[in-house]
Image: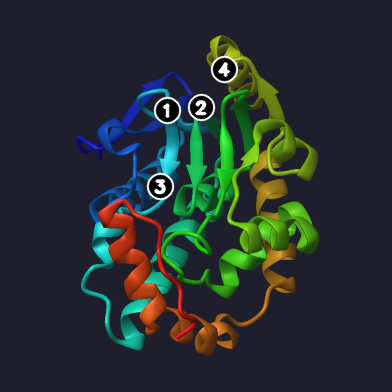
Amino acid sequence: MSTPHVVLDRDGPIATITFNRPEARNAMTWPMYDALVELCDDLEHDVSVRVVVLRGAGGKAFVAGTDIGQFRTFRTEEDGLEYERRLDAVVDRLEALARPTIAAIDGATTGGGCAIAAACDLRVCTTRSRFGVPIARTVGNCLSAAKHALFLDLIGPARLKEMLYTGRLFSAAEAAEAGLVNRVVEPDELDAVVGEYAETMAANAPLTIRASKEMIRRVQAHRRIEPSLGRDLIVSCYTSADFREGVQAFLDKRPPRWTGR
């Protein structure tokens, strides 16, 4: 079911989910995350849908992470753990959707938005797109073990360490070189290229594609660690003074003053 901020459109066998909050660079609120899960559930049962495309409205961002204002009230260790559990559940639902998914990316793709893109099967981006998880220079939180594993599967440990340690955003060319995206195109080519991918996959054997996707997902899941093994690290970040400072600095639009506490 569509909402004002998460919109579903259909064109024959191709469904498109648009994150529609351009005034906030499509930063995700919990109602938006919940709507994405609900749409995945709906599309799972619609046999007429063969391919799902995800995109951001406005031309400036795919999804610029989670709305940081939602972190204002975080104080206890359970706050951070529950946030990561909920976000993992959203990403897992998208990754397990029994349809091929394509992220059509134009602009900033950061934090939770980068995880959403990584959970898609293919990623096509424009030359002006940028990718990263800049938490080391913004709010000072920590990704879950599951999201570390998601990125490790795509870009490997050296590239992931560079992304997380520096907090900088990869250019479209760097993302392609790292294996984070499948193809880079000019902005005016994005719709045509994504449409070609979607139409090709929609015309192919759906059971073969579904089996291939699920087989790959099961292999990846088998190699990933138990999520609880990262609990202490998540707690150490989300309960820190640095995290509270990072959130406030982000909302104040100033550089954070890190203390390591």
Label 3 or label 2, whichever comes before in sequence order: 3
Which residue does the image show at 21% across and 38% down from the upper left?
A: 3
Marker disc for residue 60:
1
> Can residue 95 be seen by looking at this rendering?
yes
Three-letter amino acid code at the position of disc 3: Cys
Q: Nearer the viewer, residue 195 or 234?
A: 234
Q: Nearer the viewer, residue 40 or 147?
A: 147
- Looking at the image, residue 203 sits to the left or right of residue 105; the answer is right
- Front of the two marks 3 and 4: 4
Contact flag, marks 3 and 2 (Cβ < 8 Å)? no
Contact flag, marks 1 and 2 (Cβ < 8 Å)? yes
Three-letter amino acid code at the position of disc 1: Lys
> Can residue 150 be seen by looking at this rendering?
no
- Measured in 3D between alpha carbons, the distance from the residue under mark 1 to the one under mark 4, in whole angstroms, is 14 Å
Q: Is residue 58 above or below residue 5?
A: above
Marker disc for residue 40:
3
Question: Which quadrant: the C terminus?
Answer: bottom left
**Image coords of residue 230 (percent x, y):** 57, 83
- Measured in 3D between alpha carbons, the distance from the residue under mark 1 to the one under mark 3, in whole angstroms, is 25 Å
- Measured in 3D between alpha carbons, the distance from the residue under mark 1 to the one under mark 2, in whole angstroms, is 7 Å
Contact flag, marks 4 and 2 (Cβ < 8 Å)? yes
Crowding around mark 1 (Cα neighbors within 10 Å: few <14, some 14 to 19, many 20+) is many
- Measured in 3D between alpha carbons, the distance from the residue under mark 3 to the one under mark 2, in whole angstroms, is 22 Å
Label 4 or label 2, whichever comes before in sequence order: 2
According to the picture, the residue beneath numbered tag 2 turns out to be 106
The residue tagged with tag 2: helix, strand or loop?
loop
- Measured in 3D between alpha carbons, the distance from the residue under mark 3 to the one under mark 4, in whole angstroms, is 23 Å
